[in-house]
Amino acid sequence: MPIERVVVDEARHPDRDRTYVLDHLIDHYRVAGTIPPVHATVRGGMLVVVRAHKYLAVAHALGRPVVRAIVDARSGPTAVAAWPGVAAVDVAATLRREREQPRYLQWHLIVFEAPLPAAAREGVEAAVRAFFAGLSVRAGNGLYQPEALAFAPEGDRLRFAVPVLDGDDSWYGDHLRLLRGIDRDTAPIASFSGHRLP
């Protein structure tokens, strides 16, 4: 969807989501690539965002000319498909491709509230490596080994990528426990991949 056809109407559909830190979300998708879709309704020849407002803000901040959108079926999405520059997605074909290529590289960004001293950075890196090494051993498939794991020069952000299986979130709860432990025992975490810790 051309980004200029997607708007926000805070009076009718305010952004009530407080789970994201916008600057961190922008930083995350600068590297992570594909921004998730906004949820929208058709109104007056435009798409009006009703949910996931921050993904539109991220797309604008990163200068993306298009944004993905899930259009409310009750608002006339078939008309949207005829708009210039709109590409409809074949969901069944996309799911089939994902099953055929189930591995992908998932980016992570942990932002701390303040720069960490060298010893704390080393401890966090070791904890992250150990966590994913355990997942890799359990999976027995060569996945879950962190790549490009490094702190930003300022010492307040740790970024890394992990090869994972699409749809496998069985490890997510343990990952949150790891992050909460780091937040509690090492240094307060401002966000992970743009999300506040729940």
Image (cartoon, rainbow, N blue to C red):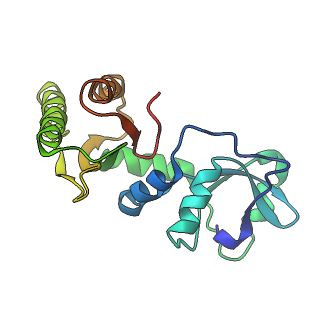
Q: Residue furthest right?
A: 44
Taking depth in this image into account, of 13 and 155 the one nearest to the observer is: 155
Q: Residue at x 11, y 28 (%)?
A: 137
- In the picture provided, is 109 more to the left or to the right than 86? left
Q: What is the quadrant of residue 167 in the picture? A: top left
Q: What is the quadrant of residue 135 in the picture? A: top left
Taking depth in this image into account, of 60 and 182 the one nearest to the observer is: 182
- In the picture provided, is 170 more to the left or to the right than 51? left
Q: Residue at x 80, y 55 (%)?
A: 9
- In the picture provided, is 165 more to the left or to the right than 146? right
Q: Is residue 89 visible?
A: no
Residue 30 place in picture, x, y as percent: 40, 63
Residue 144 place in picture, x, y as percent: 20, 39
Residue 53 place in picture, x, y as percent: 65, 51
Taking depth in this image into account, of 84 and 67 the one nearest to the observer is: 67
Q: Residue at x 12, y 41 (%)?
A: 122
Q: What is the quadrant of residue 146 in the picture? A: top left
Quarter holding the N terminus is bottom right
Q: Is residue 177 above or below residue 8?
A: above
Q: Is residue 95 above or below residue 132?
A: below
Residue 14 place in picture, x, y as percent: 76, 46
Q: Residue furthest bottom?
A: 84
Q: Is residue 60 visible?
A: yes
**Numbered circles on residues, count:** 0
